[in-house]
C-alpha cells in the first residue's frame, strides 16, 4: 500500500494505525471518538468527541455523569461536568481531571459529548504521549459503545413492542372479520326463514279471507266457526307482521355487515402492510444493535 493511499488521522498513534492497517474492515466498522476542541468555561481544550444519533441531551448527560462518578472522587461543575481525581490506569498512573460538555448540534438530531482529559502534563492532545492518547481514547470508545448499544437496544425493544402491538391489532381485525362473516351467514339464514314465513302467512291469509264454507252448519256452528276463523286470521296476521319486520331488519343488517366486511378487509390490508413495514424496521434496528462495536 503506497503512502498516498493512506490517510493518517491526527489522533491515530502508531499502535492504533498499525491495527487499522492490519484489519481495515474492523477499523472502518469500529466505533471511535474523533479529534476535536471545545470551549469549556476555563478555555478551549482538545477533546475526544463522542456523537450519538437520535439521542436526547438528557440521556447523554445522565450517562456521562454516571460514568464520571464511577472513576472520580468527586463530580461537579455547572456549565460542564467535571470529574476530579479520576483514575484511568490505561492512560496514566496518576489521577486525571475529566471535563465533559454535552451539546445538541444545530439542525441535527445528533448529541455530542466533548470530553477533555487533564493530566499533570496538561490536557491530552495530539502531542501527548501515546499511552495517554490511546488510554483516553479507549476509555471514551468503550463508553461510546456502551451508550450506543443502550440507545440502540432501547430503539430495538421499542420497535419490537410496536410490532407486537400491530400484530395484535391485525389479529383482532381478523377475528372481527370472522365474526362479521359468521353473522352474515346467520343473518342470511334469518332473512330466508323470514321470507319463507312471510310467504306461508300470505297464502294462509288468502285462504282465510276467502268466503268460508258454512253449508250444512246450523247458526250456532256458524258462529263458532266464525270465531275460530277470526282467531286464526289474527294469528296469521301477527305472524305476517313479525315476518315482515324480521325480513326488513335482516336486509338492513346484511347491508351493514357487508359494509363492515369491506371496511374490515381494507383495514386488514393496511394493518398487514404496517406489520410488514414494522418488521423490516425491527430487523434493521436489530442489525444496527449487533453492528455496534
Image: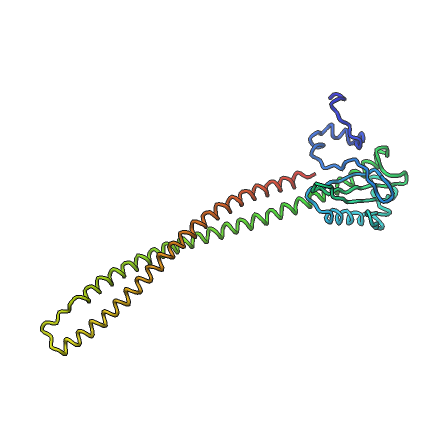
272 sits left or right of 144 in the view: left
Looking at the image, which residue is at 62% across and 48% down? 158
Image quarter (top left, top right, bottom left or bottom right) of the C terminus:
top right
Q: Does residue 135 appear left or right of residue 290 in this picture?
A: right
- 125 lies above or below 210: above
Residue 237 appears in which quarter of the rendering?
A: bottom left
Seen as rendered, the residue at the extreme bottom is 220
Question: 75 or 37: which is nearer to us?
Answer: 37
In x, y percent, where is residue 15?
A: 79, 31
Residue 41 percent location from the top left of the image: 85, 45
Residue 26 in picture, x, y percent from top left = 70, 32
Q: Residue furthest top?
A: 2
Q: How many marks?
A: 0
Q: Foreground residue, 108 or 36?
A: 108
When the figure is inspected, residue 211 is found, relative to residue 60, above or below; the finding is below
Indicate the position of residue 286 as horizontal and vertical percent values.
62, 42
Q: Position of 21 compared to 79: left or right?
A: left
In this rendering, the answer to whether 194 lies above or below 44 is below
Specify the quadrant that holds the N terminus: top right
Q: Within the image, what quadrant is residue 188 found in?
A: bottom left
Q: Quadrant of residue 123?
A: top right
* Residue drawn at 36 percent across, 60 percent down: 249
User: Residue at the location (14% across, 79% down)?
Assistant: 220
Q: How is the structure coloured here? A: rainbow
Query: Residue furthest toward the left?
Result: 216
Q: Residue placed farthest to the right in the image?
A: 120
Amino acid at each position: 500500500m503506497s503512502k498516498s493511499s493512506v490517510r493518517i488521522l491526527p489522533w491515530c498513534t502508531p499502535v492504533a494505525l498499525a491495527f487499522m492497517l492490519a484489519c481495515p474492515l474492523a477499523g472502518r466498522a469500529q466505533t471511535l471518538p474523533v479529534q476535536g476542541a471545545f470551549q469549556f468555561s476555563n478555555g478551549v481544550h482538545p477533546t475526544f468527541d463522542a456523537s450519538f444519533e437520535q439521542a436526547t441531551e438528557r440521556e447523554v448527560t445522565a450517562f456521562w455523569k454516571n460514568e464520571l462518578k464511577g472513576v472520580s472522587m468527586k463530580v461537579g461543575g455547572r456549565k460542564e461536568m467535571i470529574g476530579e481525581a479520576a483514575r484511568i490506569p490505561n492512560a496514566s498512573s496518576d489521577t486525571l481531571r475529566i471535563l465533559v460538555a454535552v451539546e445538541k448540534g444545530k439542525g441535527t438530531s445528533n448529541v455530542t459529548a466533548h470530553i477533555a482529559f487533564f493530566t499533570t502534563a496538561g490536557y491530552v492532545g495530539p502531542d501527548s504521549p501515546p499511552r495517554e492518547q490511546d488510554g483516553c481514547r479507549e476509555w471514551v470508545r468503550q463508553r461510546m459503545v456502551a451508550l450506543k448499544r443502550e440507545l440502540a437496544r432501547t430503539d430495538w425493544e421499542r420497535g419490537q413492542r410496536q410490532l407486537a402491538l400491530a400484530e395484535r391489532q391485525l389479529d383482532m381485525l381478523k377475528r372481527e372479520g370472522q365474526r362479521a362473516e359468521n353473522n352474515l351467514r346467520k343473518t342470511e339464514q334469518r332473512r330466508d326463514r323470514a321470507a319463507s314465513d312471510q310467504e306461508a302467512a300470505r297464502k294462509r291469509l288468502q285462504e282465510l279471507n276467502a268466503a268460508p264454507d258454512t253449508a250444512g252448519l246450523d247458526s250456532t256452528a256458524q258462529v263458532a266457526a266464525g270465531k275460530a276463523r277470526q282467531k286464526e286470521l289474527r294469528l296469521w296476521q301477527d305472524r305476517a307482521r313479525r315476518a315482515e319486520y324480521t325480513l326488513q331488519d335482516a336486509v338492513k343488517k346484511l347491508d351493514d355487515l357487508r359494509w363492515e366486511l369491506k371496511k374490515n378487509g381494507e383495514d386488514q390490508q393496511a394493518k398487514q402492510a404496517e406489520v410488514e413495514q414494522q418488521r423490516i424496521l425491527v430487523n434493521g434496528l436489530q442489525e444496527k444493535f449487533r453492528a455496534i462495536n
